């Protein structure tokens, strides 16, 4: 029992510390899994369909015409509200992401990651 | 708040309470904000009364929880709609077929139960995506290749149950055809296993599909006879090498011989999914656009006019890219034999060696690898096709609905279908981009699929136009016996109505099964035109 309690305490404390300090790290992991296949920076030169690059990055390049970075991880203007709105509501071809896919806690981590360089 | 049809608010709330007991409150979603996450992002009825929205969602993590949910649904007559990863976009996404259904979100059931390298199979739960399974196999350096559909975020289970397909050899790219063994929660909450899974202690569930007696696996695809909770899949041993090669055929009429030769290779199991193309047709989207417009200016051109057009363009009418998997000696030898056969069958055919790879490719090269699905690597690069691009910069669509019909694997059917699709678009008052140089999809090796991709919007006026086109194409194609194999929920009644031999005897047979297997009609009412007895008036 003593060992169980000790383990619980350590794991629980670990989670607490992680949640407070490491959300950017987890946010990057979540981003890599769920977002990079469309919003990544590296793409094949030739793809079977479309005009090269990845769908999200390509679409944002057309949208912003160089005024803002097409790669989300390079943006410094993203806000928590913008990110959550797009993830939960979808936008154009990007579909809604459910909580069974990316939980609210994971979404907060993604926000922390994508806003890490936000200009104050 | 949306309630299921014919269910009181009190009963609905009681059912939600039992769902919470089964899976915990945090995995039952009933607030408007949470239920909205189960809307079909690509709905062709977005924001309209006909949009198929859920009343709630429940996300079990275990088979026993699925059984509890099903039993509760029977008690309160709650319609359920199971999804696996919920990414079946263009075919409904994570939204139910019938408005007011409770979505059973199986994403949390995400265990890879077994991958056997020597016997080349996997056994997975519904929430496992192609990305997940690929990662598992690569992390362990298992010498197995997946066959993946274009979007890798779907699940092997969900994709195969909706008759999805991929890119490698025919035996694997028919994803339902490559399954072996299922576990299913029936509409009354019982649990069955098919094939050898029905034999206690058998160790051959993923080795032999049929067992003995009637094989019922097909009942659970595109249907509403149960919730599949485990499914086995045969996988391809990792080939030593990959080689591609491209053949061109100069004349328009050469397509007939080209199809015959490609089919020969396909049916012998010598090539992966062939990729047909048309250098003349492709060029017409660039500098040749004016010439193509000229060809099409008086409507569908005669074969003679098309042949003259090809000659004038000084480009081959057709191309096909072939993909070989196996030991290096084999793939190079097959390509050599292929060149010999095509040179004999098609005067003036040309050949270009393509990419040669030793498999598996190094992980660090994966991000820049072209056409990943050809190598069994999941990706989402296909969405580039419908993403905002310079042509749609100011008005990109909000989604799309694919409409592909099955036609015979022959040149004459392809040419005829291209004309019919062209006419259907014009009759619907929509831009007709079809030309005589349309090429088929060959996901299923024994037939062609052809069709159109219809944009969807979060704008009811635009969606009404898209729906009119969708219906027009379905109706016009059906006149020729060309009908979809898979379709958006909004059109499932219509599509199924085209399978009408002998006064719809197939559907009537399915309805008899439905009445016996799901007496309370709680499982996915309306999916692929199959309604419970008390709702058949809903049928279009």
Image: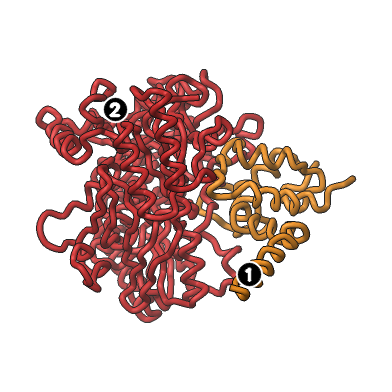
Chain colours: A orange, B red
- Name the residue at the bottom extreme: B329
Q: Residue furthest right?
A: A120
Q: Return the mark for residue A5.
A: 1
Identify the residue position indicated by label 2 in the image: B494
Q: Secondary structure at mark 1?
A: helix
- Secondary structure of the residue carrying tag 2 is helix
Q: Is residue B199 above or below residue B32?
A: below
Q: Is residue B117 above or below residue B350?
A: below
Question: Can marks 1 and 2 be said to lie on one chain?
Answer: no
Q: Is residue A3 left or right of residue B206?
A: right
The mark lying in front, picked from 1 and 2, is 1
- Give coordinates of residue B256: x percent, y percent: 27, 49
Identify the residue at image location x=66%, y=30%: B394
Task: Note whether residue B198 is visible.
Answer: yes
Residue at horizontal 20 percent and vertical 68 percent from the top: B200
Q: Position of residue B155 (x, y in %)?
A: 42, 54
Horizontal side of B272 relative to B457 (left or right) equals left
Chain on which label 2 sits:
B
Mark 2: give few (<14), some (14-19) or many (20+) Cα within 10 Å.
some
Q: Chain of mark 1?
A: A
């Amino acid at each position: 029992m003593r060992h169980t309690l000790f383990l619980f305490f350590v794991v629980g404390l670990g989670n607490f510390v992680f949640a407070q300090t490491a959300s950017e790290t987890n946010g990057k992991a979540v981003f890599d899994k769920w977002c990079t296949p469309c919003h990544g920076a590296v793409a094949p030169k030739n793809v079977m369909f479309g005009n090269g690059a990845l769908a999200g990055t390509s679409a944002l390049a057309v949208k912003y015409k160089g005024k803002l970075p097409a790669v989300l991880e390079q943006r410094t203007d993203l806000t928590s509200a913008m990110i959550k709105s797009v993830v939960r509501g979808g936008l154009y071809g990007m579909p809604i992401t459910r909580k069974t896919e990316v939980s609210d806690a994971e979404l907060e981590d993604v926000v922390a990651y994508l806003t890490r360089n936000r200009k104050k | 708040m949306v309630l299921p049809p014919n269910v009181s608010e009190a009963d609905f709330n009681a059912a939600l309470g039992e769902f919470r007991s089964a899976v915990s409150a945090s995995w039952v979603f009933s607030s408007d904000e949470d239920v909205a996450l189960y809307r079909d992002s690509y709905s062709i009825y977005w924001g309209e009364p006909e949009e198929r929205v859920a009343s709630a969602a429940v996300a079990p993590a275990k088979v026993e929880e699925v059984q509890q949910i099903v039993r509760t649904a029977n008690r309160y007559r709650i319609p359920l709609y199971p999804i696996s990863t919920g990414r079946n976009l263009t075919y409904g996404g994570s939204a139910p077929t019938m408005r007011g259904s409770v979505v059973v979100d199986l994403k949390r059931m995400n265990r890879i139960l077994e991958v056997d390298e020597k016997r080349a199979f996997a056994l997975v739960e519904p929430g496992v995506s192609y990305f997940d399974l690929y990662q598992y196999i690569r992390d362990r350096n298992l010498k197995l290749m997946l066959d993946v559909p274009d979007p890798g975020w779907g699940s092997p289970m969900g994709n195969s149950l909706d008759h999805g397909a991929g890119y490698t050899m025919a035996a694997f790219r028919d994803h339902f055809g490559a399954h072996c063994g299922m576990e299913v929660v029936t509409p009354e909450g019982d649990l069955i296993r098919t094939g050898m899974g029905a034999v206690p202690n058998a160790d051959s569930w993923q080795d032999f599909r049929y067992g003995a007696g009637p094989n019922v696996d097909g009942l659970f695809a595109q249907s509403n006879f149960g919730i599949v909770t485990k499914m086995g899949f045969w996988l391809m041993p990792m080939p030593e090498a990959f080689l591609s090669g491209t053949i061109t055929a100069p004349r328009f009429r050469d397509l007939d011989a080209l199809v015959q030769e490609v089919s020969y290779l396909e049916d012998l199991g010598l090539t992966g999914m062939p990729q047909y193309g048309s250098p003349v047709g492709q060029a017409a989207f660039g500098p040749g656009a004016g010439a193509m417009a000229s060809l099409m200016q008086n409507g569908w051109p005669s074969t003679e006019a098309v042949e003259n057009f090809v000659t004038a363009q000084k480009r081959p009418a057709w191309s096909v890219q072939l993909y070989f998997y196996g030991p290096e000696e084999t793939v190079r030898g097959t390509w050599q034999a292929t060149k010999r056969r095509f040179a004999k069958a098609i005067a003036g055919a040309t050949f270009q060696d393509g990419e040669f790879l030793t498999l598996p490719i190094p992980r660090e090269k994966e991000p820049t690898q072209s056409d990943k699905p050809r190598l069994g690597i999941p990706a989402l690069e296909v969405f580039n096709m419908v993403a905002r691009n310079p042509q749609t910069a100011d008005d990109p669509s909000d989604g799309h609905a694919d409409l592909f019909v099955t036609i015979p694997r022959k040149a004459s059917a392809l040419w005829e279908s291209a004309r019919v699709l062209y006419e259907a678009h014009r009759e619907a008052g929509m831009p007709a981009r079809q030309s005589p140089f349309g090429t088929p999809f060959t996901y299923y090796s024994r037939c062609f699929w052809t069709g159109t991709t219809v944009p969807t919007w979060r704008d009811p006026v635009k969606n009404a136009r898209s729906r009119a086109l969708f219906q027009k194409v379905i109706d016009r194609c059906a006149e020729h016996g060309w009908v979809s194999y898979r379709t958006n929920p909004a059109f499932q009644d219509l599509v199924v109505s085209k399978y009408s031999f002998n006064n719809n005897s197939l559907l009537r047979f399915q309805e008899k099964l439905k009445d016996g297997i799901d007496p309370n009609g709680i499982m996915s009412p309306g999916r692929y035109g199959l309604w419970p007895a008390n709702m058949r008036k809903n049928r279009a």
